Amino acid sequence: MNKAISTRLTFAVAFLSLLIFIILWQVIAQQGLLVKNFPGSFKTIGSLIWWVSDPFFDNGPNDLGIGTNLLISLRRVLIGYSLAVLVAIPLGVLMGMSKLAQSSLNPYVQLLKPVSPLAWLPVGLFVFRNSEITGIFVIFITSIWPTLINTAFGVASINPDYLRVSKSLGASKSTTIRRVILPAIMPNILAGMRISMGTAWLVIVAAEMLLGTGIGYFIWNEWNNLSLENIFVAIIIIGFTGFILDQFFGFLQDKFDYSI
Amino acid sequence: MNKKSSKISTSNENYSHLELSNLGKIFFKEKKFIDFRSKGNRSGFEAIKDINLKIEKNTFVSIIGPSGCGKSTLLNLIAGLQAPTSGKIVIDGQAIKGPGPDRGVIFQNYALMPWLTTIQNIEFALNTVFPAKTKADVKERARKYLRMVGLEKASNKFPKELSGGMKQRVAIARALSINPNMLLMDEPFGALDALTRSYLQDELLSIWRKNKVTVVLITHSIEEALLLSDKIVLMSSGPSAIISEEISVDLERPRDREKIEQDPNYLKIKMRLEKHLLRETRAVEEVT
């Protein structure tokens, strides 16, 4: 099949499926087949247009534009996530290189990794007494594990040939780390950072329901208003933002793909 | 050289370029972090033992032996990438303590950094060995060595864009760019097809003629060893491999791969090597 035709066909099929979905949703909601007063797709699309056409208004913390809330969430994620990456990469390199570091840190990593980051929320509130910093702290905890583990794994499984070349040239440890190990494990680091970002974006919504402001709080607020269509609007926007973030890392991963 | 100058010159003249004495290497199993099964027994694997070998300056020496006989271990020891369990490695009268830029190492899988272009791979070696050199100097020198292996046009290509033969030529250029006086090659042409291998063997010979270096080559191939070497070192089958024989290859240089095969001397050595390798390989295969 011709590539251009096949792309066009893919789009056509996707569009058709969306159309069918919207119609089915509307019919099911209108007939009350699910529950009474379930918002239909037309109503949801209407409120999506309403929210998106004026995204940045600010009428106090319980009445913010969806764009404003989104930016609040994104800011928390980016700060917590960046701090986590800054800690996770050096720590991961250390764990990958040193048996001592690996042995002493691995038990904590293995114990803490499976814990839902939300469990740290009360700890954050108690220590920082500030919901903003607590949000960032929860995202920090969320983001650290995948990047840390992937970095350490990358270092531990690095092609020994690169290290032998470096060693045979008499390179110092710092040269080897900067010029050989870090570039060699870029694919691992980026894979870890991609998972970290994905999880951080999942967790921020849940955390914000408890913290106030942000896109997660928007959902909680609309639940209190019993406005399910606005919750659907938020779901669509969260999904779309998460998709863009993920694609960005996909693009970076392609850039640093050394495989043949 | 007259008598007087030989007296003044350093005592290094009395040494062979490389001397291995009673060299042995035992690999001990390393305990993994979470590994409850192995209870810390230090039973080791003796790869090589009692290796004694002298290699003269600017000669070409091949080390040949059955698979798994510890040839690569021996080369890693000479390169300083691993420390011997026993014995000594002396280069120019000095016991080595680790790797150094006096020895250029070439690996079977080329070991080029995939995130660097061809020329950057060479520049990395130069920057590491000569940190004082200016950027322009480094670039110029890297270019010179790429030209030497005929790859100047590929200087901005990434390794994945090159064929296996081209990659190995870059690796040779990288190893020589740091101006070593010894080249250590670990089955450098093993992964290449027959034609490319022949081409690179000729290339290596002509490079070796122009850049005076001592070469230690690990190989599987009897023909390769015969074509290239002044001396062939035969290793027994492992574990605990030893050097079973040293054979001088007194064939005239420059050698031509077609003509050399007619030489009765060539055939005599070849038969001897084949017999040895067959015997040692049989020893390996029938044990396992």
Image (spheres, rainbow, N blue to C red):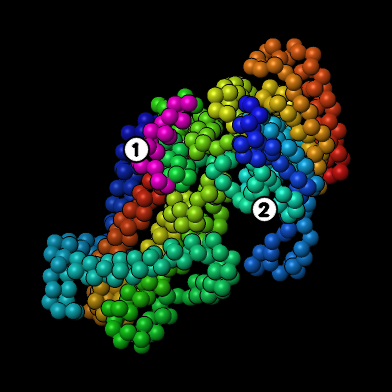
Q: Earlier in the sequence, mark 2 or mark 1?
A: 2
- Residue at which label 2 appears: B83
Label 2 neighbour load within 10 Å: few <14, some 14-19, many 20+: many
Structural distance between the alpha carbons of marks 2 and 1? 37 Å
The answer to whether residue A54 is left or right of residue A156 is: left
Label 1 neighbour load within 10 Å: few <14, some 14-19, many 20+: few
Residue B147 placement (x, y as % from top left): 44, 26
Position of residue B193 relative to residue B253, above or below, is: below
Residue A147 placement (x, y as % from top left): 44, 63
Q: Which mark is residue A45?
A: none
Q: Main secondary structure of the magenta part?
A: helix
The answer to whether residue B39 is left or right of residue B8 is: right
The answer to whether residue B217 is left or right of residue A177 is: right
Report the quarter where the C terminus of chain B lies: top right
Residue displayed at 14% across by 79% down: A60
Of A209 and A51, the residue lying toward us: A209
Residue A225 placement (x, y as % from top left): 23, 79
Magenta stretch in the rendered image: B131-148
Amino acid type at circle 2 is Ala
Of B37 and B265, the residue lying toward us: B265
Report the quarter where the N terminus of chain B lies: top right
Position of residue B106 relative to residue B223, above or below, is: below
Q: Is residue B11 visible?
A: yes
Amino acid type at circle 1 is Ala
Residue displayed at 66% across by 17% down: B253
Residue displayed at 30% across by 78% down: A133
Residue B62, located in which quarter of the rendered image? top right
Query: Are discs 2 and 1 both within one chain?
Result: yes
Look at the numbered disc 1 and give the secondary structure of its residue.
helix
Q: Is residue A110 visible?
A: no
- Residue at which label 1 appears: B136
Query: Which chain letter goes with mark 1?
Result: B
